[in-house]
Image (cartoon, rainbow, N blue to C red):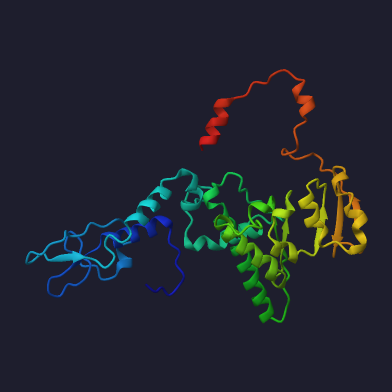
Amino acid sequence: MTYDTPVYFSITEVYRYIENMNREMIGCEDGENKPKLLDGTLVEDRKDHYFDKIQTFVPQSQSKGSKATNGPFNGEFNRFVSRLETKLTDKRLRFLLHPAKSDGSPFRTEDFEQIMKQFIGYLNKANVTIVDLSGIPFEVLSITVSLVSRLIFDFCFHYSKLRHERDASNDVPVMIICEEGHNYVPQKDDAAYRSSRKSLERVAKEGRKYGLSLMVVSQRPSEVSETIFAQCNSFLALRLTNNADQNYVKRPFPDNSSGITDILPNLAPGECVVVGDAVLLPAVVQMPLPKPEPHSQSVCVHKEWKKPWRDVTFKDVISRWRK
């Protein structure tokens, strides 16, 4: 199949196409030798029939006047179609397989510009775009992170090339911040994280040339990809009590700053050790705590345990859980 302009098919349309290929029957009468539907229609071009719905084909037959045989891919996708059907009926994947706008209408190919404006912050002129991945199933977390980071990287790449053609530099800096980065770019080369790790490592290695930078935030720096770690030019280390994390963080520090790194396990809330291009010399700085503090702040255990039991609406919690 060839198209003059890019066309993006939904996963449901792809499923229909594969299922039709899996069921396809070829008419064997004189002059046919093409996929043949139950009503006698000969399929001249598969793309005109197979994306719209699951077709019904003529039955296999050796009788004169109705000869038909299996298509070249008949039955080859049985297991794949079964697995794809399971994914399509999984409500947790609805955000990915059936994306919809705020008004409920589905996204189309022509909406790609709107999607990119949303990611880069130009839809409502916001400096920060938050992509909440907290409720995404584990099975698709890596591919979701990979797709988002690749889209942003490709946008910055092509925008930079357009600016270079006009003998100008990129004037739209973009930064991707990975909270809990060890979940997306782990040190171990597990297949479950391979796609997100590959995409974000490319951002770390090549993004600077196109105005794209990367910040990785993690409570376990020793579990972050060494490729990512090696590309960082500034480090902010808050309190670390684990020896493996301390040793991992100490490696990029200058030899004459060992005294500063020794205080890593004793830093107070808001204190951090800064080293790299962000400062002239390694230093310990006190960052102001946010006011008001975010809802994700630590629960004051000693204070809450002294209070009477609270009424918890389990019904609402479970209802939200099931959604």
Asked whether 114 or 20 is in front, the reply is 20
Residue furthest to the top in view is 308
Instruction: Report the residue at 28% width, 59% height from top.
Output: 75
Instruction: Report the residue at 83% width, 47% height from top.
Output: 239
Q: From what the image shows, is residue 217 above or below residue 112?
A: above
Asked whether 29 or 291 is in front, the reply is 29
Instruction: Report the residue at 66% width, 81% height from top.
Output: 165
266 displayed left or right of 164: right
* Count of numbered badges drawn on the protein: 0
- Residue 261: % across, % down: 88, 54
- Residue 208: % across, % down: 72, 70
Residue 144 falls in which quadrant of the image?
bottom right
106 displayed left or right of 193: left
Residue furthest to the front in view is 243
Q: Is residue 52 at least partly visible in the picture?
A: no
- Residue 274: % across, % down: 86, 56
Residue 24 falls in which quadrant of the image?
bottom left
Asked whether 224 or 43 is in front, the reply is 224
Q: From what the image shows, is residue 266 above or below residue 280?
A: above
Q: Is residue 203 at least partly visible in the picture?
A: yes
Residue furthest to the left in view is 64
Instruction: Report the residue at 69% width, 51% height from top.
Output: 179
Quarter containing the N terminus:
bottom left
